[in-house]
């Protein structure tokens, strides 16, 4: 068993910089356990409301646990991060924030949903919609070989705010090393998220994360890579079926917005959801996919797993009635 280190909970930073002093040095093959804060750094609590979003201090976002210096990691190497275990802390939040997300003009007002995880595996929106929990860190990366600070957003070829929902327990992340030791940092815990994170936030929350680190000498990557464990990427929803809305346009983002808008509308008509709840649910549970690129028009689809619903949708109920 590899040596286990506990990363100090009070040592955070908010930007990557090659001159940041490492908080901890470890040897390849050793493991670090992190208690990470949520993206808003505890500004949102289980008792917060939508009105509290107006008072957020944006300078206080993205607390990163780090930097971590891995002995022997040099520019031109690859840093290997095995995610061994990810533990949620029983609650999370999702926010619609002005001027952000895929449909900012259609959702101009702040909106906050607090989620509680009662049974360890699902966050409940209401008594018939539950989102399966698959926690991961939305932000993981190393320092770049440039002068000055690098913000977590946008993500870069050295990582950052990647929001890749598949970097869960059992996944290995590979990052190109640009500075001695790599200077790895991690944060931005998510309990659940759909591919695309369309309303701008997932189910955000604090996490406990264990990672084992190693170095591949002399292998230089062009950008991040991941390798998942054997088995399903979405084990909670694989056998429940999906329904998808499509956007068709000659511009990728226009097609994306159309697919998301159509999903918001369909969740309202099929399940009676308010638009804000439908947008939030699309962000935390549905996956954007590029369906078609070889014609002049793009097709972007948004896949919603039917397993999140504990009753049939309106379409199925209508079809059942037609056969009676």
Image (tube, rainbow, N blue to C red):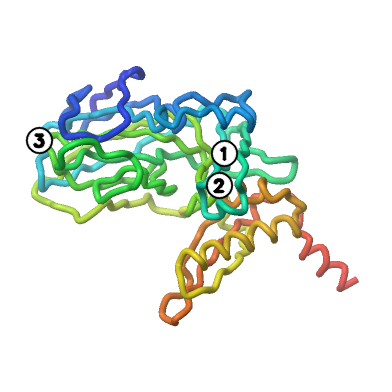
Cα distance in 3D space between marks 3 and 1: 40 Å
> Sequence order check: which comes first, mark 3 or mark 2?
3
Q: Kindly state the secondary structure of the residue where label 2 is placed.
A: helix
Cα distance in 3D space between marks 2 and 1: 8 Å
Image quadrant of residue 271? bottom right
Please state the horizontal and vertical placement of residue 84, each as a whole percent of the image: 35, 36
Image quadrant of residue 286? bottom right
Q: Give the residue number, with chain letter if any, for mark 1.
A: 94
Q: Give the residue number, with chain letter if any, for mark 3.
A: 72
Q: Dot 2, crowdedness within 10 Å: few (<14), some or many (≥20)?
A: many
**Residue drawn at x 51%, y 66% as measured from the top left:** 254
Q: Give the residue number, with chain letter if any, for mark 2.
A: 284
- Please say if the residues under marks 2 and 1 sit with CB atoms less than 8 Å apart: yes
Cα distance in 3D space between marks 3 and 2: 38 Å
Please state the horizontal and vertical placement of residue 156, each as a whole percent of the image: 28, 49
Q: Is residue 253 left or right of residue 304?
A: left
Instruction: Name, please, the residue furthest toward the right.
Output: 324
């Amino acid at each position: 068993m590899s040596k286990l280190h506990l990363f100090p909970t009070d040592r955070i930073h908010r930007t990557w910089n090659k001159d940041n002093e490492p908080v901890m040095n470890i040897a390849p093959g050793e493991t670090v356990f992190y208690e990470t804060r949520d993206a808003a750094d505890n500004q949102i609590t289980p008792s917060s409301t939508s009105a509290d979003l107006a008072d957020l201090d944006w300078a206080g976002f993205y607390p990163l646990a780090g930097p971590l210096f891995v002995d022997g990691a040099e520019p031109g190497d690859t840093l290997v991060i095995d995610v061994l275990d990810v533990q949620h802390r029983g609650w999370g939040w999702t926010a619609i924030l002005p001027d952000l997300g895929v449909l900012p003009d259609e959702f101009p007002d702040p909106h906050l949903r607090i989620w509680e995880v009662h049974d360890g595996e699902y966050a409940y929106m209401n008594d018939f919609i539950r989102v399966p929990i698959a926690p991961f860190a939305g932000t993981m990366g190393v320092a770049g070989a440039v002068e000055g600070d690098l913000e977590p957003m946008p993500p870069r070829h050295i990582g950052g705010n990647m929001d890749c929902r598949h970097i869960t327990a059992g996944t290995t992340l590979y990052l190109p090393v640009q500075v001695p030791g790599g200077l790895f940092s991690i944060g931005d815990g998510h309990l659940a998220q759909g591919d695309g994170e369309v309303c701008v936030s997932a189910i955000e929350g604090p996490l406990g994360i264990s990672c084992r680190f190693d170095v591949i000498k002399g292998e230089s990557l062009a950008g991040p890579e991941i390798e998942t464990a054997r088995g399903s990427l979405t084990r909670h929803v694989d056998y429940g079926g999906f329904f998808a809305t499509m956007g068709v346009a000659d511009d990728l983002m226009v097609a994306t917005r159309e697919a998301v808008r159509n999903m918001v509308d369909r969740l309202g008509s099929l399940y009676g959801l308010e638009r804000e709840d439908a947008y939030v649910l699309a962000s935390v549970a549905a996956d954007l996919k590029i369906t078609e690129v070889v014609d002049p028009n793009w097709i972007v689809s948004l896949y919603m797993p039917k397993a999140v619903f504990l009753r049939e949708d309106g379409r199925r109920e209508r079809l059942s009635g037609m056969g009676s």
